[in-house]
């Protein structure tokens, strides 16, 4: 590029820049007369004070008025009343400082339900009639296993137990170690994580809980004497019978109230117990055959006597 062309381009650029600056200055002045008047009349305020108005001044004025009112009330009240008020305030402050915080322990929901049941059930319904046999409970075949407790406290009266055993591989034709986790029922929350226990099957408590603890072989951490005792099989069966008695008595009382036979409660209880008695398939077949054979023997005896 020739030097003359460079000089022309620089002159053109300087002239256009000067024109644009003059246009901006004419269109956008640095400060309008209105803004200058505002700035000269009073100091600048922030947007928050502008939006809220003169609230701080109003609050200060209200505080001054309240203080003056309090002083007037104190001057109007006698000296003895002021002294009594001061003594009361000191006593309240000392009592609040010396009072110990009372911790309210929450009542478990199971105890609340038991209290409500005791209030609702009359005392005469808790006694089982002497001429009615106690209800029977189902007996399941069971096996004993030994395992280690791996998880405690995640479920109510239920723990996880790891059972070590062996599994047969049909392809390789060899046994391999395997660990199976069972959900075991703990009636009294006696187990701790790490305990080696003996548990048995055949004790359904929930759809996924079909095992129950029998005894603690090796406790971990806390001694057995410092824990709730693990109930035996006999104690568990007795507790189940008692619960079933209470349930059947409650059902019999409800049926008697519906039928209007509250006076003959024993007959209604017997009928309810017989209707709720569990009869398995094999037992039902045996009873049916026994009744059929007894009826046939009675008919043959009547024919022979005739």
Image (cartoon, helix red, strand yellow):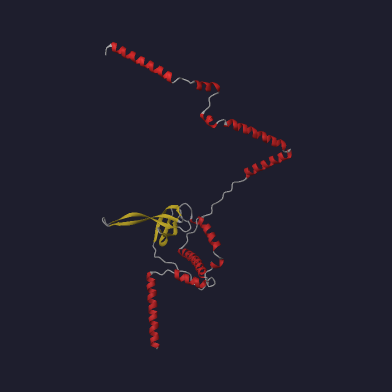
> Is residue 193 among what the camera can see?
no
Residue 150 percent coordinates (x, y): 41, 52
Q: How many marks?
A: 0
Residue occupying image coordinates x 38% and y 75%: 288
Depth order, front residue of 222/156: 156
| Residue 296 falls in image quadrant | bottom left
> Outermost residue, left direction?
171
Location of residue 274 with respect to 153 vertically, above or below: below
Residue occupying image coordinates x 50% and y 71%: 268
Location of residue 78 with respect to 23 vertically, above or below: below
Residue 205 percent coordinates (x, y): 43, 60
Residue 120 percent coordinates (x, y): 54, 62
> Is residue 58 among what the camera can see?
yes
Quadrant of the drawing holding the N terminus: top left
Quadrant of the drawing holding the C terminus: bottom left
> Outermost residue, top direction?
4
Location of residue 106 with respect to 122 vertically, above or below: above
| Residue 183 falls in image quadrant | bottom left
Depth order, front residue of 50/202: 50
Depth order, front residue of 20/182: 20
């Amino acid at each position: 590029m020739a030097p003359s062309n460079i000089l022309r381009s620089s002159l053109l650029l300087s002239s256009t820049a000067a024109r644009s600056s003059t246009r901006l200055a004419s269109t956008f002045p640095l400060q309008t007369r209105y803004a200058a008047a505002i700035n000269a009349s009073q100091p600048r305020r922030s947007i928050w004070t502008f939006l809220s108005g003169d609230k701080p001044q109003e609050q200060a004025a209200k505080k001054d008025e309240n203080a003056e009112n309090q002083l007037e009330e104190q001057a109007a009240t006698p000296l003895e009343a002021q002294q009594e008020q001061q003594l009361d305030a000191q006593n309240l402050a000392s009592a609040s400082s010396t009072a110990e915080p009372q911790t309210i322990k929450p009542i478990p929901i199971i105890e609340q339900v038991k209290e409500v049941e005791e209030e609702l059930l009359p005392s005469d319904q808790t006694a089982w009639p002497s001429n009615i046999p106690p209800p029977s409970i189902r007996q399941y075949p069971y096996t004993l296993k030994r395992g280690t407790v791996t998880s405690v406290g995640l479920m109510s009266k239920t723990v996880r137990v790891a059972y070590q055993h062996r599994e047969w591989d049909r392809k390789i034709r060899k046994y391999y170690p395997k660990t199976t986790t069972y959900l075991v029922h703990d009636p009294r929350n006696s187990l701790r994580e790490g305990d080696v226990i003996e548990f048995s099957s055949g004790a359904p408590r929930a759809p996924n809980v079909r095992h129950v603890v029998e005894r603690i072989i090796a406790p971990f951490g806390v001694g057995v004497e410092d824990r709730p005792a693990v109930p035996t099989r006999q104690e568990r069966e007795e507790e189940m019978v008692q619960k079933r008695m209470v349930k059947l008595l409650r059902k019999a009382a409800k049926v008697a109230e519906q039928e209007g036979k509250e006076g003959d409660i024993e007959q209604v209880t017997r009928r309810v117990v017989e209707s709720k008695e569990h009869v398995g398939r094999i037992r039902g077949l045996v009873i049916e055959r026994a009744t059929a054979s007894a009826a046939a023997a009675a008919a043959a005896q009547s024919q022979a006597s005739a």
